Image: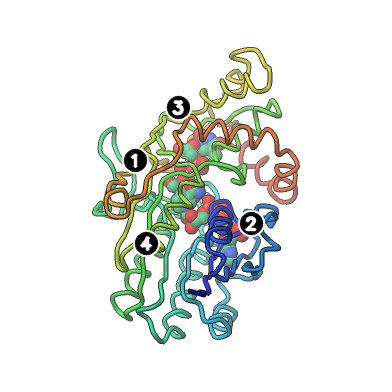
Amino acid sequence: MKKNILITGGAGFIGSHVVRLFINKYPNYNIYNLDKLTYAGNLENIRDIENSSNYNFIKGDITDSKFINELFNKIDFDGVIHLAAESHVDRSIENPDEFINTNILGTLNLLNAAKNTWKEKEDKLFYHISTDEVYGSLGEKGLFTEETSYDPRSPYSASKASSDHLVRAYMHTYGLNTVISNCSNNYGANQFPEKLIPLVINNIKKNKAIPVYGKGENVRDWLFVKDHATAIDTVFHKGKAGETYNIGGNNEWQNIDLIKKICEISDSRLNRKKGESEKLITFVKDRAGHDLRYAIDSSKIATELNWKPSLTFEEGIEITISWYLENQAWLDNVLSGEYENYYKQQYSERENK
Ligand code: NAD
Ligand code: DAU
């Protein structure tokens, strides 16, 4: 069946993988990629599919309610997959306002437009992409389930928690069909190199210090981005309206161990002496309010929707390291502009801890 699907944030890291998957897998869908192209959005991420007949790019800002209302009046969307957001925790600590505007008010604008224009609401779906950070921080044991109480602890996670609550409220109050998924840390190609994994690879390439926050003891549960994209496809097509699905890779790493693993693989790829890249590790001032551990119980999506990751972490990290080593032009492109100044300021402050 012909469908109009709006994907927000499709020029970003995860969104670009979702757009590509939908364009290739569903030629009968018209995909509308709405993106503001902030520092994190880059049309290079989706260059390979931009001429597809079922692809449309719309440059626009979800915080602009007039623009969003006009868009929903013009195009009869059958579904929304909402990824557009400010996504970096450190930036939310520096400048929370942008996170409140984009992540909360931007989501509100999309919900209002869907509520006001969708006549046959039961045939439509508003799918909100969220994060495991809404559940707060775990101790050494335990996993986040869909029943874990919300306990966001950074401006980023508070803004995502708030948008999750709004999405559920619009289902209960206005009868909008909604579904939410909360995913753990993603890694893979096209991630802006301010996030841990691409930052480490990029710094190794350039022989620059690898900044490890605190003692490097914090734990994250890593999922290959293409597996997140297949999970999103699964939830969009098979998920039950009103439900929440946790998505994770069952793949916990302490930061310091993960960084050493990346150093080891990079040494062999770059023909460096064993242990060479590890010398770049530099312990710096910790992130304020740094959550200790995230880990996801993804048994609900596995048993109810039959989804599981396709790659082991060993396979995924090899692919990822190769991609950043081979795509210098992409790195140069995204790192030009305002980011260089931001990075210099951030890290000179951290190194002078
Ligand atoms: P990203 O920062 O790489 O991309 C965000 C995209 O949104 C960019 O293309 C940007 O231009 C666009 N955008 C930002 N503000 C906008 C606005 N006002 N209007 C329109 N577009 C705007 O983020 P990501 O890592 O791909 O994350 C995508 C979504 O997935 C986010 O909602 C994030 O909270 C969620 N998420 C991310 C992870 C992760 O590990 N990266 C894990 C779980 C959930
Ligand atoms: O859990 C899902 C979340 O994962 C997503 O919702 C966020 O959008 C995404 O950015 C990510 O958040 P994190 O804060 O976990 O990711 P980040 O890559 O910034 O950091 C990963 C860990 O590495 C974290 O414990 C902080 C640490 N770190 C990070 C950077 C950038 C360092 O030690 N040094 C660094 O330079």
Q: Position of residue 274 (x, y in %)?
A: 60, 13
- Reading the image, the residue beneath label 2 is 41
- Reading the image, the residue beneath label 1 is 295
Between disc 4 and disc 1, whose residue precedes?
4
The residue at the point 65 percent across, 42 percent down is 343
Q: Looking at the picture, which amino acid does disc 2 mark?
A: Gly
Label 4, ligand 1: CB separation under 8 Å: no
Q: Is residue 235 left or right of residue 60?
A: left
Between disc 2 and disc 3, whose residue precedes?
2
Q: Nearer the viewer, mark 2 or mark 3?
A: 2
How far, Cα to Cα, is label 2 from label 4? 22 Å
Between residue 34 and residue 38, name the one nearer to us. 34
Q: Position of residue 143 (x, y in %)?
A: 28, 41
Q: Position of residue 242 (x, y in %)?
A: 30, 67
Q: Looking at the picture, which amino acid does disc 4 mark?
A: Ile
Mark 3, residues whose alpha carbon is within 10 Å: few (<14), some, or many (≥20)?
few
How far, Cα to Cα, is label 2 from label 1? 27 Å
Between disc 2 and disc 4, whose residue precedes?
2
The residue at the point 67 percent across, 16 percent down is 272
Label 2, ligand 1: CB separation under 8 Å: yes
- Reading the image, the residue beneath label 3 is 215
Numbered mark located on residue 180 in the image? 4
Of helix, strand and loop, which one carries label 1?
A: loop
Between residue 3 and residue 199, name the one nearer to us. 3
Q: Looking at the picture, which amino acid does disc 1 mark?
A: Ala
